[in-house]
Amino acid sequence: MAKFMDVHHGMEGITAEQLRQSHQSDLDIEGDEGVHFEAAWADPEAGIVYCLSEAPSAEAVQRIHERSGHMADEIHPVPLSV
Amino acid sequence: MAKFMDVHHGMEGITAEQLRQSHQSDLDIEGDEGVHFEAAWADPEAGIVYCLSEAPSAEAVQRIHERSGHMADEIHPVPLSV
């Protein structure tokens, strides 16, 4: 398992409820790929969402996001954290 | 107070110890601006570091990073989180 930060662009105007629902739709199926989405943060003005996860691979993260209807634009392994 | 995600590029090859030291140098002076850096994550291969903070403004975040010798390339307010 490794940690990943993925980034979504084009999310201008996202609301708290939309972020909550999108995150929940990931949580509902994340177990299928051995992924866990730990947190997400949104900048509605710039339209950026960051998601932090633990997962076996970036591909597993993307498969969950794709099935939930919101593919990530970037997925970065972040092996270092403080 | 608000939450911010800031992003540093050009950090290729950053080590765990360098990330820890950089984070500590922020923590040492963050109180001067009422900022608190909660966490940081690094992708050494792509050279990207993400920092999550609570702060009165993006400018306050940048002033701490600047004094610590590592200005952020982007600072995003992230008023929404899950």
Image (cartoon, coloured by chain):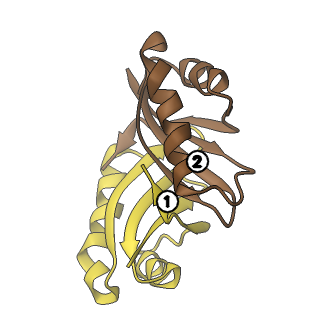
Chain colours: A yellow, B brown
Q: Residue at x 48, y 70 (%)?
A: A70
Q: Callout 2: 10 Å neighbours few (<14), some, many (20+)?
A: few
* Amino acid type assigned to the residue bearing label 1 in the image: Leu
Distance from the alpha carbon under mark 2 to that under mark 1: 10 Å
* Local SS, label 2: helix
* Local SS, label 1: strand
* Residues at discs 2 and 1 in contact (Cβ within 8 Å): no
Q: Which chain does the residue under circle 2 lie in? A: B
Q: Residue at x 59, y 50 (%)?
A: B49
Q: Residue at x 30, y 54 (%)?
A: A20
Where residue A72 sits: x, y (%)?
Answer: 55, 68
Where residue A11 sits: x, y (%)?
Answer: 54, 52
- Asked if one can make out residue A48 in the rendered structure from this viewpoint, the answer is no
Using the image as rendered, state which of residue B43 and residue B4 is in the foreground.
B43
Which residue bears the numbered disc 2? Answer: B18
Where residue B51 sits: x, y (%)?
Answer: 51, 42
* Amino acid type assigned to the residue bearing label 2 in the image: Gln
Relative horizontal placement of residue A24, taking residue A45 as reference (left or right) = left
- Asked if one can make out residue B33 in the rendered structure from this viewpoint, the answer is yes
Location of residue A40 by image quarter = bottom left
Relative horizontal placement of residue B66, taking residue B50 as reference (left or right) = right
Where residue A73 sits: x, y (%)?
Answer: 61, 67
Using the image as rendered, state which of residue A64 and residue B45 is in the foreground.
B45
Using the image as rendered, state which of residue A31 and residue B25 is in the foreground.
B25
Which residue bears the numbered disc 1? Answer: A80
